[in-house]
Image (cartoon, rainbow, N blue to C red):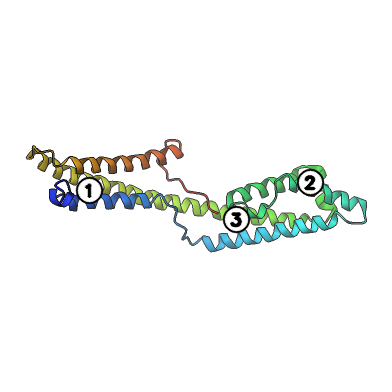
């Protein structure tokens, strides 16, 4: 057996305990996907997609209407929709929410677009699309907050466990290294330093993403 192996140095249990705590802490940086909100969020996303595709198809059909006022209104709305790019319903959750919010705001705030919506009798459909998008955004935000709170509590506990495992390992190594003059603990000390740096870097990245705050970041979905 290699003289620098943790088993030989009799610090394997302490080193493995520290490794396990670091691995468990790393796992907390991965956003869990299980939530009581998820089924309703998915249903609302499907509903708003259906709403949007429907209203877009109606508008597209009206562009060929024999009445010039109706076709002009449809063409105006078509141009507005195209401003937000193709495949809107295939955007990720947050991007689609933002696009629908901006687009329906155009329809409410810009007189020519408001008039076009009224000419095509799409006001109720527009209101429904906006409502479903708002409901989606509300639930999505609640789920994000749920994940953030859950992960932050767990990470606080896990950081304490990492610190405790680190202290136990360091004390054990220092005690043994004090009695040894062969340098046989060099390899395990280097491995320990690498693990410690890895954990520290995780925390720095996490804080950097949140502008230095100690709140968890939550990744976007889709």
Mark 2 lies on residue: 79
- Label 3: few (<14), some (14–19) or many (≥20) C-alpha neighbours in 10 Å: many
Above or below for 192 versus 46 = above
3 or 2: tag closer to the N-terminus? 2
- Label 2: few (<14), some (14–19) or many (≥20) C-alpha neighbours in 10 Å: few
Which image quarter is the C terminus in? bottom right
Mark 1: secondary structure = helix
Mark 3 lies on residue: 136
> Residue 55: which quarter of the image?
bottom right
The reply to whether residue 107 is visible in this rendering is no
2 or 1: tag closer to the N-terminus? 2
1 or 3: tag closer to the N-terminus? 3
Residue 52 screen position, x and y as percent: 71, 56
Tell me how far mark 2 sits from mark 1, CA to CA.
Answer: 61 Å
Residue 104 screen position, x and y as percent: 71, 48
Q: Residue at x 60, y 55 (%)?
A: 136
Q: Residue at x 39, y 48 (%)?
A: 152
User: What is the number of the mark on residue 165?
Assistant: 1
Marks 1 and 2: in contact by CB < 8 Å? no
The reply to whether residue 73 is visible in this rendering is yes
Q: Which one is in front, 153 or 45?
A: 45
């Amino acid at each position: 057996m290699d003289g620098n192996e943790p088993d030989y140095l009799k610090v394997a249990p302490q080193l493995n305990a520290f490794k396990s705590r670091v691995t468990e802490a790393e796992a907390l940086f991965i956003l869990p996907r299980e939530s009581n909100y998820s089924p309703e969020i998915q249903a609302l996303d499907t509903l708003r997609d259906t709403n949007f595709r429907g209203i877009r198809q109606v508008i597209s059909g009206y562009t060929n209407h024999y009445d010039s006022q109706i076709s002009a209104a449809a063409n105006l709305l078509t141009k507005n929709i195209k401003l937000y790019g193709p495949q809107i319903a295939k955007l990720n959750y947050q991007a689609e929410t933002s696009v629908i919010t901006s687009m329906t705001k155009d329809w409410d705030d810009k007189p020519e677009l408001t008039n076009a919506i009224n000419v095509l009798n799409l006001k109720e459909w527009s209101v429904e699309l906006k409502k479903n998008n708002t409901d989606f955004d509300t639930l999505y935000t609640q789920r994000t907050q749920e994940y953030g709170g859950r992960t932050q509590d767990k990470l606080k506990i896990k950081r304490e466990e990492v610190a405790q495992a680190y202290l136990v390992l360091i004390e054990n190594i220092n005690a043994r290294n004090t009695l040894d003059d062969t340098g046989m603990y060099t390899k395990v000390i280097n491995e320990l330093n690498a693990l410690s740096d890895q954990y520290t870097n995780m925390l720095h990245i996490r804080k950097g993403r949140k502008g230095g705050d100690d709140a968890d970041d939550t990744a976007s979905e889709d």
